[in-house]
Each structure stands twice: as C-alpha cells, then as structure tokens.
Amino acid sequence: MSEPAPGNLKHTPLHDLHRELGARLVPFAGYEMPVQYTSILEEHRTVRSAVGLFDLSHMGEIGVSGDSAVEYLRHALVSDPGTLEIGQAQYSMACDLEGGIIDDLIVYRLADEAFLVVCNASNRTAVVEQLARLLAEGDFSASLDDRSDRTGLVAPQGPRAAALIGELTELDLDSIGNYRSAAGTVAGIECLVARTGYTGEDGFELFCDANRARELWEALATAGDRHGARPCGLGARDTLRLEAGMPLYGNELGRDTNPFEVNLGRVVKLGKGDFVGRAALQAVKETGPARKLIGLQMVDNAIPRFGYEVRAGGAAVGRVTSGTLSPTLGTRIAMALVPAGMASVGNPFEVVVRDRPYRAEQVQLPFYKRPRD
C-alpha cells in the first residue's frame, strides 16, 4: 500500500493511476477513492452494456486456516461455511450477540481447511477484532491472517467481463459459476479469479498481490478497448447495486438492523448449532422482524435520498436508506425500512423531500434483473 493521504486517508495500490486517469477522488472508508472518472451515468451504462473496471483494493481480506477453521467460522458467522465445496463462496454476515450486523461479507473456500473472508473496508477493524476475540476465547485450532494491505482487488463487471478476462487467462471461465472461484493467472499475474460482484451484472473479482495490481489493471484496460471497457468509480457502483436491490453497510445494514429485517434471513443457518447472535436471531425468526426493507418507486417527480422521512397515511413510519434516479430504468427509486405490517407490494407511501411529501408506491425488489441467455 502507498503512504496515507493527507488527513490520514490511505491509498490503494492504484491511487497514482486514478490520478493519471483524471478521477475525482473522495474520502471513503478511510481511503481516498475514485468516485467517478467521466460521469456516473456513463460509467453505470458501461457496466450494464459492456464492462467496467473497479478498484476494490480498499476491501478487507482475512485468511482463516487450520484444523478447526470450519468449526471456528461456523461459530463466528451466521452462515455455514462447512457446506462449501473447495472453490465455492457464500454471502454471509458477522453479527453481535443482539443479532445486529457487524458486517456483511463473502467467504471463499480455498482448500479443505483454508478460507478467505472478504469484508467491507469501513468494518475491517471491527471484523478482525471480532474474529480475533472469538479465536482467543474458544478452543479452536485455527489462525487468522489479515492480508488486506498485501492484496490488490480489481473487478471487471458487466456482460463483456468474461470475454475480456478470457483473452488474458487459460482458465476455463465457463467452469467458474456464480459464487465460484479458481486460482490461475490473468495477464501472467497470479490471481484468485472469483465470479462475484456488487453490480447486478455478470462479473469477476480478481485478487492479486498488491504490488502487481497496476500491471493487472493496465492489462485489462488495454485488452478492454475491444470490449468497450472503461474505469468506473464508487458513484456508479452505488447506483448499480441499488438497482440490483443489494444492501450497503451504513445504509441498509448496521448494528441496529438484523438479517431478517433486510430480507436476508436465508443467510442465517439457525440449525447448524450455536453461533454469535443465534439466540437473538432465533427470537426474531419466531416472532417476525419488526421492520422490513422495501423497494419504493416514486409516483411524483422527486428524487428520494438517504435519510428522507417515509410516511404512510400522513404519519412518519420510516426512513429512506438509499435512493436515486435509476439510470437504467429512468425512474426514481429507493429502498426504505418500514414497519413489517405495512410492507406489501402496491402499498402507497410518501417520501418527504424538502419538507414536502411526494407520492411513492412499494414495488418488488430488486428493481433490475440482468437479462439471461
């Protein structure tokens, strides 16, 4: 990693490249990150139609290995990593004793007793501390390796991502299904090639040595010219994930929410045995969540934003967690947390924008699903 930026912001291995490409850089999760290069709209449309390149090297990567790695992760996370085949991944969460979400993450099984846990940059410290504490308190034969600062992560996302990477690797990408991974070389660089992403499109996340991240990016960008590739920033990543109905920590997810409230109860494996937060989550499962994350589409001409009040029948009932003018759909969309009893597709709501209520209607999530062959 590069030295911290002014104001103690850190840099990813691609920071200098972002400056050379004219990116607008902003503080994000302790890093100085590109929010856009040209325009969020252009970058968003590139991912939906071709392929966008994202720098995700700010994410946290934690290796977990040892004879008890499976038992340890079963205790630490709400999912069951023991069900994974080698080369398979699963979406998961780390929760506290009250069932609140410490972070959402992805677990990759690399070998029988070796896993990679990928967490959000903003929660890396909290996740590492939780994992280390649980390891110290328990009788587990396992070890942790926070390799975040040694890892670069470049994510080609979009319908042309496989064609692009296919020019640079001998791996059979067709054999790497969704939420699968394989070790191999891309442009001669050792990578973990994972078919995962956060855009609602087909795509890959390429983990490599941080010192070779720029070389990997430049090889992808050069080959990507034939595929309509362009660099994309966090702004487009946010509008893409919102259209796809994917939650963002700090917006939809947090210590004050539990997986069942945000439509992710399927991730929680209550039958696997005891784990952190199990008792609280079992109670939520039995009684039902008090709130529910819903999708809203505006009827009136107003753009909903994070934190805006949501009303029903003139009374405040919740808050917008994310909102935007959808570049793909051309409509104004939002996600919001409201009382579970009010959540039903077609129900009317109002969103307060600049002290004025505007009509909205609950719609099915996700807002966008990519076309399938």
Image: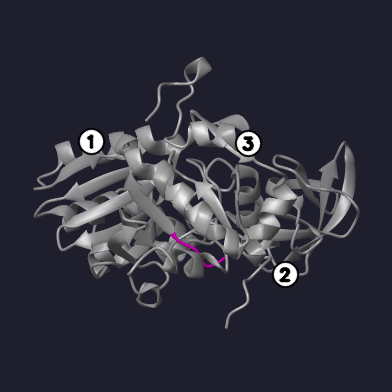
Judging from the image, what secondary structure is the residue with disc 1 in? helix
Which amino acid does the dot numbered 3 rest on? Ala
Instruction: State which tag comes first along the sequence, 3 or 1.
Output: 3
Judging from the image, what secondary structure is the residue with disc 2 in? loop
Which amino acid does the dot numbered 1 rest on? Arg
The N terminus sits in image quarter: top left
Position of 21 with respect to 319 (left or right) is left
Dot 2: within a 10 Å radius of its alpha carbon, few (fewer than 14), some, or many (20 or more) residues?
A: some
Looking at the picture, tell me which residue is in the foreground, 195 or 340.
195
Taking 136 as reference, is 115 above or below it? Answer: below
Dot 3: within a 10 Å radius of its alpha carbon, few (fewer than 14), some, or many (20 or more) residues?
A: many
Q: Does the magenta stretch include residue 201?
A: yes
Which amino acid does the dot numbered 2 rest on? Val
Prevalent SS, magenta region: loop
Dot 1: within a 10 Å radius of its alpha carbon, few (fewer than 14), some, or many (20 or more) residues?
A: few
Q: Name the residue under label 3.
A: 23
